[in-house]
Amino acid sequence: MPEHATELHTPAWPTARSARTGRRPIEDFFARVGSDPLAAAFPDARRAHPPMRARAVPEPDVPLHWERLLAQPRRQRGTAYVHVPFCENHCLFCGFYRHPWREDAGAPYVDQVIAQVASLRQRAVLEGPPLRALYLGGGTPTALSARDIARLVEALREGLPLAPDCEITLEGRIWSFTADKVRAAFGAGVNRISLGVQTFDERLRRALGRKASRAEVIHCLEQLVATDAGAIVIDLLYGLPNQTPELWAADLATVTALGLDGLDLYGLNLIPGTPLLSAVASGKLVPIGHAELGRFYAAGAEALDRAGWLPISTTHWRRGVRERSIYNYEAKTGADLLAFGAGAGGSLGGTGFLLVSDLADYARCIDTSSCPAVAITEAAPNAALHDAIRQGMERGRLAPDAPARLCRERTGTDFLALVEPLLAQWQEAGLLTRHHDFYDLTLAGRFWQVQMTSRLTDWIDQELSLRSAPREGDRDDRTRHDA
Ligand code: SF4
């Protein structure tokens, strides 16, 4: 970004809050205008998800709330997640590492998860709409033996109300995904395999702590595609230390030649507590600068477009119609999420919960039929409205219908009048275009989707809370900004 870009138009972040009300002016939510929007629309490109705002239930009340959650039928679209929290090593960039993999840990752990599923047999929470997607993630589910993968998937299919067209994904690593496990997974009903490749480049892979070589990765993916038994999808990361545009282009050329069904492109996040962040902090590794990340994203989108792939979310592309990516979309946009396994997190009717992550504690909870939840958060006041916004933004299109209806019904507020000044400024900044009644994210807008969604929901929350609880002196401020 040229140095002078910040001088051209609005805004300089953040502007001052109102001293009387604590209200942030709308300019705080604006994008930078007059520079390359891919490089500099907002100050920070490295952020994974829009934050959820929720109030925690006091710890002593968690078991009671847990029982209440299980005693209510589900009322909306739903999915299920199974956490397998073992990894063969700690990949440098990853914030999800919990427990080192041990051969003798797999079978007892699978027994416990199956017992947790069975414990719901008579519970009302299994009533309601059938589940659209089941995701076995981690960690490394493919570290489990072929027998354990098969009996786990079979028990889940038997014990959960899965829809006939349920997407059943097994996530894993190439290193441990042997042919007998592939057969066991598809034989048990898995219809989608998701592998975290991150990069095909040998040097970058070694620096990330990935064990399989480029040749092994390609061979494994070719074998999986040749089974023709389900969708094969992978993740690639951009913004890695020492990753050049040429290396990124080579990764994209490799991926489009493999016959895969789906692909996620993620910008590298520097997550607190990861070895990568320590290496960056000590100067051992230098990640790609913020302003460069958008160009990597754009290069990825263009390469996939040239190869005939279609985006079905702002981070996910598919080559043909086999890939649906149901779980990722539903989990990010407020669907019910039944969760199983140590450290798994879920959500029911907007109430979030987290299961105990210590393996011995999880085993004890399952053995004694006691509450495995260690934290529960109540739904945020505007959660349904946020979810309606995310459902569009996640796919690259803000469709105002559903948010407008919810906003009117629940708060009596005109949604479009509330957000129009922000959407107009984002159009000026090159992040949105108007298409009929929709607001489509441009390529730059798709890159900044998470930051835009956060700003949109932050702005709405602030304005709705001021409207619902006016304080003396608020009125002038709000009137001026709503005009
Ligand atoms: S990337 Fe996967 S295998 Fe590596 S540490 Fe994270 S969860 Fe474990």
Image (tube, rainbow, N blue to C red):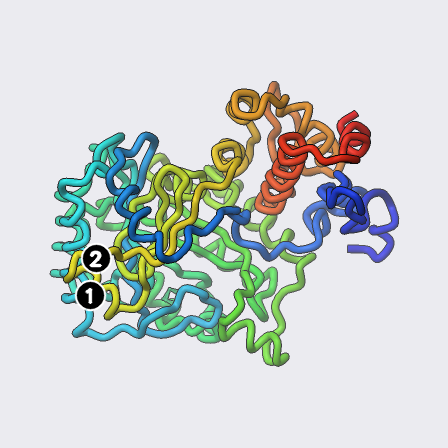
Q: Amino acid at mark 1?
A: Arg
Residue 219 visible somewhere in the drawing: no
Residue furthest top as drawn: 436
Q: Earlier in the sequence, mark 2 or mark 1?
A: 1
Residue 167, horizontal then vertical, whole percent: 28, 40
Dot 1 corresponds to which residue?
364
Quadrant hosting ligand 1? bottom left
Task: Name the mark on residue 341.
Answer: none
Crowd rating for badge 1 (residues with CA inside 10 Å; few <14, some 14–19, many 20+): some
Give the total number of marks visible in the rendering. Answer: 2
Q: Out of 174 and 474, give the one closest to the viewer.
A: 474
Q: Is the residue 400 above or below the residue 304 in the image? A: above
Rounded to the nearest angstrom, the CA distance separating label 2 from label 1 is: 8 Å
Residue 40, horizontal then vertical, whole percent: 72, 51
- Image marks 2 and 1: residues in contact by CB distance under 8 Å: yes
Residue 298 visible somewhere in the drawing: yes
Q: Amino acid at mark 2?
A: Ser
Left or right of 6, for residue 375: left
Q: Give me the residue at 44% from left, 64% from top.
A: 200
Q: Out of 130 and 441, give the one closest to the viewer.
A: 130
Q: Is the residue 76 above or below the residue 122 in the image? A: above
Dot 2 corresponds to which residue?
370
Left or right of 183, for residue 252: right
Q: Give me the residue at 20% from left, 32% from top.
A: 164
Q: Give me the residue at 62% from left, 46% from top.
A: 451
Crowd rating for badge 2 (residues with CA inside 10 Å; few <14, some 14–19, many 20+): few
Query: Helix, strand, or loop for circle 1?
Result: helix
Q: Quadrant of the N terminus?
A: bottom right
